[in-house]
Amino acid sequence: MVARVIAVDPFDLIVFGATGDLAIRKLIPALYHRDEAGQIPPEARIIGASRRPLSDEAFRDAACAALQEHVEPANRADAALQRFLARLSYVAVDAAGDAGWSDLAARVADQPERIRVFYLAVKPDLFGPICGQIGHHGLASTHARVVVEKPIGKSLESARAVNDAIGEVFPEERVFRIDHYLGKETVQNLMALRFANMMFEPLWNNAHIDHVQITVAETLGVEGRAGYYDTAGALRDMAQNHLLQLLCLTAMEPPTSLADNAVRDEKLKVLKSLVPITAENVGEWTVRGQYRAGASEGGPVAGYLEELGAPSSHTETFVALRAQVANWRWAGVPFYLRTGKRLAGRVSEIVIGFRPVPHSVFDTSAGPLLPNRLVIRLQPDEGVKLWLMIKDPGPGGMRLQHVPLDMSFAAVFPVRNPDAYERLLMDVVRGNQTLFMRRDEVEAAWAWIDPILDAWALSHDAPKPYTSGTWGPSAAIALIERDGRTWHEDES
Ligand code: BG6
């Protein structure tokens, strides 16, 4: 199986926050991989921009160090490295002030017609000011587009303000709001699975599906990001965007095509169909947790408060939610969502739990008849498992077993699994918005999240503590078990 590379048009990519964490860990390695694969044309330029003065040479050194750290040695041929580094240059620009903007304008002035991408890998409060300066300096040509990362605001109101500020300079069709989960291979596979196969869609409804589980579990803590994280928490950091996007792709109606607005219209309808969680049901349908000291990946780890260096905080590092989509397809089918840091394992998966068969023809010696489950594993060990009941081989009567039809993508497709940013960056250059969030989607997601935040604030309850290295507070287990269901655990 060979990866297919379709070259993109020449572009100038200006990365604000060029020496920050996102650029170093994700953007520069992703661009390098695309360049190494031959997707980036020779004329394309990558211009780093941030406040601190740095020579082109020093920026290339920083990029080179990033590649040494984040790219496998087998993919780091010297010629490819040198070719990539030669594309890089640097301009010191004050995002909020005037310094450096004319230098940046001069750097791209020779190519006014070229695709120009502004990637804002900076704090969200700089989105508005940077867009303002881009407009003010005449850099927002008709071929220019802007890429922003989450979080877009902290609430519906602040998200609107950020979107308004961006919208003053860039029309919606040139705004690319990244949710990197949409760039993950297996997330796109969810669309392939649903819409390129006949066998799932007829069953994809409340007549055949009992419930859906979406888990994004991490073993890492908040690392060096406690300052940001404490102002966000798991609901804003993961649920408002990644979990809800996964829910949308699972629950949406088949779009008429993969055209950007065809897909985004369907996702928006799902977000608008979510049953509100308010002060009345927040205690029953949500669980918040915060990790304490414990063990993770074989070693002792500190608790959240120690990492934060504060005696107390009500910020949740874990959240479990029982969501409901109020429409004909999904009425009565709960969607259980959970995400957390310092959990027992790193696993992201979507589990479709089917209903039990209506009548058993087997006698009790066959053993229990367990319902089918379709497990879409996003990471790690990307793949799809379909759990079926099968007869135990050999004599001894009709004994049944629950076993998976197991497709591991690494075994079937022995190619490097590209990072989400590789695809997303090339989609920006191509101008394809299908895997990016439209303004109304982001705002509809906030409109569902805001009342949960308000209800939590009203309750004054602290998040429930959980020991690092466990699956979160026991209340999260109770949340699903109250309904007679359990969180999926891989039995194989
Ligand atoms: C980010 C969150 O959006 O996603 C982080 O801000 C989180 O807190 C990360 O760790 C998880 O992404 P991935 O790709 O490692 O699953």
Image: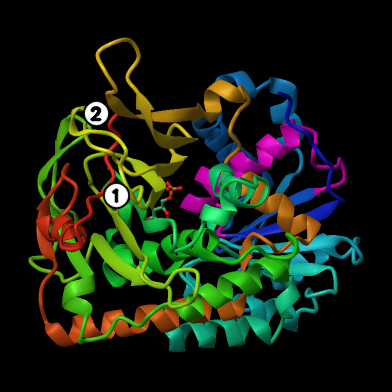
Residue that badge 1 annotates: 223
Mark 1 element type: helix
21 or 203, nearer to the observer = 203
Q: Are marks 2 and 1 in contact (CB under 8 Å)?
A: no
Residue that badge 2 annotates: 366
Q: Confirm whether residue 153 shows in the render.
A: no
254 displayed left or right of 276: right
Q: Residue 24: within the magenta?
A: yes
Identify the residue at horizontal 21%, vertical 81% (top origin): 281
Identify the residue at horizontal 71%, vertical 64% (top origin): 433
234 or 397, nearer to the observer = 397
Please state the horizontal and vertical placement of residue 347, each as a whole percent of the image. 35, 42
Q: Closer to the camera: disc 2 or disc 1?
A: 2
Residue at the extreme top of the image, as rendered: 394
Q: Amino acid at mark 2?
A: Ala
Q: Residue 136: within the magenta?
A: no
Segment colored magenta: 17-44
265 or 131, nearer to the observer = 265
Quadrant placement of the C terminus? top left
* Label 2 C-beta lies within 8 Å of the nearest ligand 1 atom: no
Please determine whether, in this image, residue 488 is positioned above or below residue 335: above
Q: CA distance from mark 2 to mark 1?
A: 49 Å
Q: Confirm whether residue 486 shows in the render.
A: yes
Identify the residue at horizontal 57%, vertical 55% (top origin): 202
Please state the horizontal and vertical placement of residue 307, each as a whole percent of the image. 18, 54
